[in-house]
Amino acid sequence: MKLQASSLILIVIALGLGGTAYLLERHPSSQSEISGEPIFTFEEDQVQALTIKTRQQTLAFVRSERPRQPQQQSKWLMTTPLKAPASEASVAYLLNLLVSARSDRQLNVSVSQRSEFGLDRPLATIIVKLKNQETHQLVLGKPDFNHSSLYAQAISPAEGSPPPQIPKNIQVLLVPTTFENAVNRPLPEWKWGNSDQPVPVDPD
């Protein structure tokens, strides 16, 4: 009986360790998220223009290259859906996420599986144009099974010539859910001072 009891205890311990490993795999710690791979490698000051396409609206912003004047409210200008000084805080919050957020997991899946991750009808598509004319995109899909991350696809210029045909597989990332808050803002929150009156601006 003692041998059987000891064996039973060992089995319980083994099961417990196995369950812990499973939970760690399914629910990575904050430390693993911090040490994950960066989504993009560009810096915030390299960004020249920003477009955000959600299911409700499309917004476009451009950085003003003119020396900042005392009466200039923001270094970012909204060009779509109207021309107005942009909320510097709202734009900066999203840009900070783009340059600092990391993905703790990547999944290599077939292009035909995009709908399973909500990438066929995305929550939002963020298009970043750099000063060197490079264009990067982040497509935000649906939340994962426990709503701790969003599925996403990062699209950046490939080195050398573009591939001759559409790839059969794509890499799906898990990115912070804070992206959802960063893009799902009503139009007034994207304008300087939440003003309802458009202010003509020169984006050059």
Image (spheres, rainbow, N blue to C red):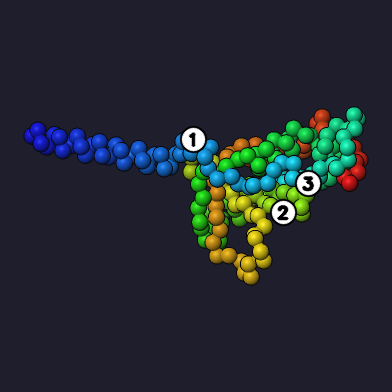
CA gap between label 1 and label 3 equals 32 Å
Of the pair 5 and 69, the residue shown nearer to us: 69
**Sequence-first disc among 2 and 1:** 1
Whole-percent x and y of residue 1? 8, 34
Q: Are marks 3 and 2 in contact (CB under 8 Å)?
A: no
Disc 3 on helix, strand or loop?
strand
- The residue located at (53%, 37%) in the rendering is 34
Q: Reply above or below: 54 against 73.
A: below
**Which residue carries the number 2 mark?**
135
Q: Are marks 1 and 3 in contact (CB under 8 Å)?
A: no
- At mark 1, the secondary structure is helix
The x, y position of residue 20, in whole percent, is 35, 37
- Structural crowding at the residue carrying mark 1, measured as other residues with C-alpha within 10 Å and reported as few (<14), some (14–19) or many (≥20): few
Numbered circle sitting on residue 57 = none
Which residue is under mark 3? 48
- Is there any visible trace of residue 147 in the rendered image? no
